[in-house]
Image (cartoon, rainbow, N blue to C red):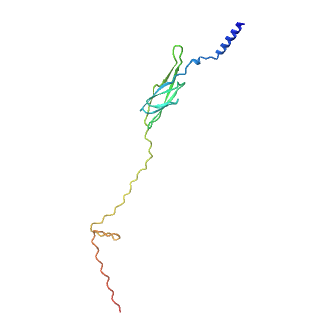
Amino acid sequence: MRRVIAIAVAGMSLAGCSSFSMDYFKSAPPPMQVQLDSQPQGADAVTSLGPGCKTPCSVSIPAPESGFSVTFNMPRFQPVNIPVTVTRTPGDFTSPATTVLDPSPVFAQLQPAGPPPRPPRKPMRPKKKKPRPAAPAAGAPAPAGSAFPDPSAAPPPAAAPPPAAAPTR
């Protein structure tokens, strides 16, 4: 009977081990450092995985399963999107697993954005010149219809008194 109990106990313990996996001994992959740079420096770099910074910088990302992209933005420059490929090499008993990013470091050459378009200008039309009236010669009387006499002209002669009317008888 002892043998039956020992075999039964051993069978139960082996049955419990069938759900046991070596995954419990594997650690989560460590985060990776990604170097980001741009020309000119000072651009905002944001990964499609979330983290971002101002170039030149380094961000820590979780070890990606597949490729991702980095977008570089800077005022007065066109945005640039750089795809990054991820190559994973599984490890074995003699070597650890490796993850390689291409390109590394991630670099972007930013191109200046053109000036904002200006609205079209309307062509200017030349102004028509008005003819100037001829200036009166010095000493000439002011025009007859003028309300203001010429101050440099001689005063007009005094008007003679009207003739007296003859008495009628």
Describe residue 62's horizontal placement relative to residue 38 as left or right: right
Q: Point out the image quarter for the N terminus.
A: top right
> Outermost residue toward the bottom?
169
Q: Is residue 97 above or below residue 52?
A: above
Q: Point out the image quarter for the C terminus.
A: bottom left
How far across and how far down the image is residue 117, in percent?
45, 43
How far across and how far down the image is residue 127, in percent?
38, 55
Q: Is residue 81 visible?
A: no
**What is the quadrant of residue 38 in the picture?**
top left
Q: 40 or 145, which lies in front?
A: 40
How far across and how far down the image is residue 109, in percent?
43, 31
Describe residue 77's horizontal placement relative to residue 150 as left or right: right
Q: Residue at x 66, y 15 (%)?
A: 16
**What is the quadrant of residue 75 in the picture?**
top left
Q: Is residue 145 above or below residue 63?
A: below
Q: Residue at x 59, y 18 (%)?
A: 24
Q: 161 or 93, which lies in front?
A: 93
Q: How many numbered discs?
A: 0
